[in-house]
Amino acid sequence: MQNPPSLPPKPVSEVWRPELTRVPEYTFRRMLARRALWIVERLLVATRLKLTVRGLENFPAKGPALIVLNHLGDADIVVILSQLRRWDIDLLGASNLYDITALRIVAEAYGVIWLHRGRPDRRALSCALESLQRGRFVTIAPEGRESVIGGLEQGLDGAAFLALRANVPIVPIALTGTENRRIYDFRKWGRRPPVTMTVGQPFRLTRSSDRHADLKNGTDQIMRQLAGLLPPEYQGTYRE
């Protein structure tokens, strides 16, 4: 792993609102909303992006499993959900997005587990673990934010904690081309930017008697699995 350049610190949620965080209940309205949003996502991806998908056969037929992804921009989740025709994928989302009205409406309709970044959010982790215990998929970006270097940043331990505690497989999904500067470049309207989505083989983290070492090693394993699915220019901190 390369020595990381001097980067701004990882974001910390300024407002603590644990009452927002809950396990999404699969009501009829929520499942209808997820199907409707999937149709919108498919249309957006088909008309706005030139998408190449690899390894879709690697995605498990059923949960529970933890989905990890590299985080380049706002389109990451839209691309992933548009290609995974499943309604049992729960998302961990940054709580600061709740204050953006349009995003709040969509996220609440879908059912997001709100996560307060930059400090231990035991309620969010507990909700994510409960979703996994119910046999669902849970999606998390181990970097903790959209990359500010255009490639993989240092991973945080949240994903490894969930995978180890729930004892579930991890599904790595790597994206390229979803940076906001490319997606929102309206000067190139009508010219679809190329985007790739690569689904890797599911894997499990190894356990030992040293919990702290397991977290550190698990995070490193997760990030290296993602790096292995990415071209060198997107491997960032984990470029060999």
Image: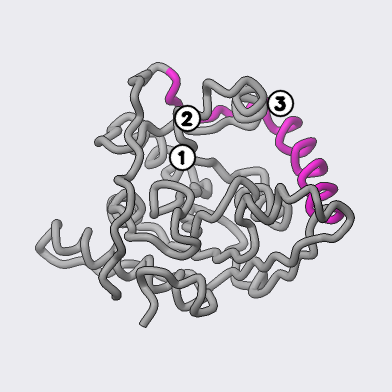
- Tell me the quarter of the picture where residue 19 sits: top left
Tell me the magenta residue range: 20-47
Is tag 3's residue or tag 1's residue first in the polypeptide sequence? 3
Q: Give the SS element for disc 1.
A: helix
Residue 131 tag number: 1
Would you name the residue on which mark 3 appears?
28
Magenta stretch, main secondary structure class: helix
Is residue 46 inside the magenta stretch?
A: yes
- Image location of residue 24, percent across then percent down: 53, 30
With respect to residue 46, does 221 lie above or below?
Answer: below
- Image location of residue 209, percent across then percent down: 10, 63
Q: Nearer the viewer, mark 2 or mark 3?
A: 2
Rounded to the nearest whole Å, what is the CA distance between mark 1 and mark 2?
Answer: 7 Å
Q: Give the SS element for disc 3.
A: helix
Would you name the residue on which mark 2 appears?
23
The three-letter code of the residue at mark 1 reads: Ser
The three-letter code of the residue at mark 2 reads: Val
